[in-house]
Amino acid sequence: MKTTEERFEDLEIMVMSQEKKLEDLNQEVIRQSLLLQKLLLEHKSIIQTLLKDSQIKKQSEETPPPHY
């Protein structure tokens, strides 16, 4: 059977390990958040480019095809 001191040391080791995992997870969340912000900006830029350069007109602005 472990002594109280040994059990306490085991608990300290577990807490240190959990703190490290928590910090690692926090860093990953920060990294993913930054990546998401970047992707959203790129997406917005692509949409704006497509809309600006688009040859597609609104249906009301389109001329009917010749067979009408």
Image (tube, helix red, strand yellow):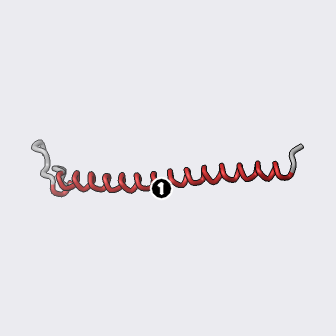
Between 40 and 20, the one lying in front of the other is: 20
Please name the residue shown 60% across and 51% down the image. Answer: 20
Q: Quadrant of residue 44?
A: bottom left
**Residue name at image x 36 percent, y 52 percent:** 39
Q: Spot the residue most to the left.
A: 66
Q: From the viewer's perspective, tell me whether residue 59 is left or right of residue 9.
A: left
Q: Amino acid at mark 1?
A: Ile
Could you tell me residue 37's position as x and y percent?
39, 56
- Residue 66 in percent (x, y) is at 10, 44
**Callout 1 secondary element:** helix
Crowd class of label 1 (few under 14; some 14 to 19; many from 20; radius 10 Å): few
What is the tally of numbered marks visible in this picture?
Answer: 1
Image quarter of the N terminus: top right
In the picture as drawn, the residue positioned furthest to the right comes out as 1
Image coords of residue 35 (percent x, y): 40, 52
* Residue named by callout 1: 30
Is 9 left or right of 22, judged from the image as shown? right
**Residue occupying image coordinates x 47% and y 55%:** 30
Which residue is at a point 32% across and 56% down the rendered structure image?
41
Q: Nearer the viewer, residue 17 or 4?
A: 4
Q: Nearer the viewer, residue 52 or 25?
A: 25
